[in-house]
Image: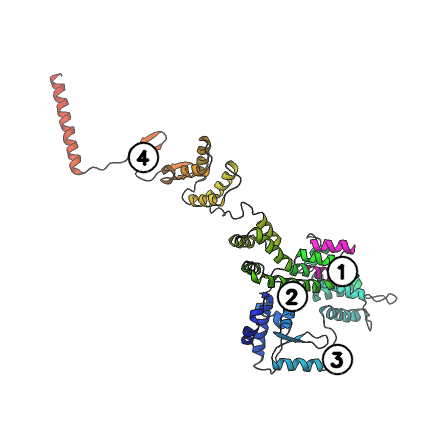
Amino acid sequence: MIDDFIECQLAHADDLAELKVSLAALRLLEQKAQGVSVPFVTERELMAHPAVRDGLSFPAITLGLALQRAVARGTLLAAQIGDEAPRYFANDPAGRRAVDLLHQALEIPSEPASKIAAVMRTVAHEIERLEQIEVFASTQEDTLLVEEWLTCGYVLDEIMAAVQLTLRSPRAKHLPARGIKDVTVTLMASPPGEPSEYFEVMIARTKRLPDEVINLRERLDRPPTPHEYVTLRNATGLFGLRATLEGLKRLAESDTFRIDALLPSLAEQEASALALHISGAQTGIHMRELIALYESSFGLPPTGAIASEMQTLWAETSDMTLWHSIFEYAARQNKRSWPYVRKLILNPSHDVFTPAPINEAARFAFNEYKRRVDHRLDASIAADINTVSQTVTDTVVWRNAFDKAAAAAALNWNYIKKVLTSPANTKSERTNGRAKYAPGTPSKRSGNFRRPQVTYTEEQRQAAEERARQRNEQRAKQRATGK
């Protein structure tokens, strides 16, 4: 299967997520083919695969879109029976026969087994037991409440504990049966064990409202529901803030404003725009390299709007080395967003590529240079400072060099570097503002000069003693004669 994919379809695959999902699906199908005549895979199985779970950005969103592209390309075949999860087959004779048979089969659709429905059934049974009623008739309002609980991050155990705490006291016979609405106050009184982003933003309000949520709230003139919030944030994570805001604008201009139409609309627009720009970029080697650079940095190919901006910026800044450096710098700063990269390309900051100080002396020199010489520290000067700071590590020496340059009216790096690299600084190691001289060299301490020690040979010592004896004898004779 994988060999056929490599020979026939790999050359046309232009989406990284589609490529990863296709290879993972074909590998699983090959493994299943050893025990099943017509194997198939599901989204749940693919989500458990490391290449999908750890290799895709927002896998819960991108997996479905990648499978749609794989089916559209003909790599995989999809078949669905009722409300079951789609089954994906290899596009070979056996897979095509299986899909045809499944499409012809007349099966009764099973009841949707969504997470909300499962929690609703469990809660309803517990209410029936505690309230001693035969059937708990849930309403649409109850379903929305359970959906909000799950979106906040509450799990089934927390919900069931709140139900039991709320209904633990017996109900008076003349009062109506209590329900899900009565549980809300008890449940929401304590935060969930693992609060979701929706809870922190909309309920606890410990985080600021995202821009797209503010936009939607103004259009709806009310806070978004949990479903609307999750759908909107998923759209932003997959397509970016700008595309999401434009999508909301298009939805507002239509007759009916349905948030569920946002993701399909953005996906369709991106697919068509991306195909157009990638096909148009085939004649430009630089665009292929820029698209590959964007994809390797951010994990997803650029949207059509971003590809258009990249083409425009390339006409102004055609230095590929600069593009690579800016993308790498954005990754190091953990700012993996196209607006940040675009801002650096349009107006590259003077300090963007300045190396960081390697030690305390270099850090002091960086600050001193910006304060006294030039607030814009050139990258080449910063590299020189790092090099010199490896041998001159005392900040006092650096301060003295800056002071000396200021006294000579020569506050520039060349003069400061000349002072720092002079023999007085390179041959001595300064500590705490004092010069600590190497052994064997003269040193002045407390105003006294200490001469170096001299070692004499035995012959030199005896000759010196003989000269001293002769001088003493001569002085004794002079005193005896009175001269």
Which residue position holds label 1?
Answer: 186
Type of amino acid under label 4: Pro
Type of amino acid under label 2: Ala
Q: In the image as oriented, which residue stretches furthest toward the top?
A: 482
Lower position in the chain sequence, tag 1 or tag 3: 3
| Residue 169 visible | no
* SS assignment at label 3: loop
Q: Quadrant of the N terminus?
A: bottom right
Q: Is residue 400 above or below residue 171?
A: above
Which residue position holds label 2?
Answer: 60
Q: Residue 227 colored magenta?
A: yes
Q: In the image as oriented, which residue stretches furthest toward the front?
A: 283
Type of amino acid under label 3: Ile
Lower position in the chain sequence, tag 1 or tag 4: 1
Q: Residue 213 colored magenta?
A: yes
Type of amino acid under label 1: Thr
Q: Which is closer to the viewer, label 4 or label 2?
A: 2
* SS assignment at label 4: loop
Give coordinates of residue 399: x percent, y percent.
Answer: 46, 36
The image's mark for residue 442 is 4
Mark 2–mark 3 distance (CA, rounded to whole Å) = 28 Å
Which residue position holds label 3?
Answer: 108
Q: Nearer the viewer, residue 76 or 336?
A: 76
Lower position in the chain sequence, tag 3 or tag 4: 3
Lower position in the chain sequence, tag 4 or tag 2: 2
Give coordinates of residue 155: x percent, y percent.
Answer: 69, 65
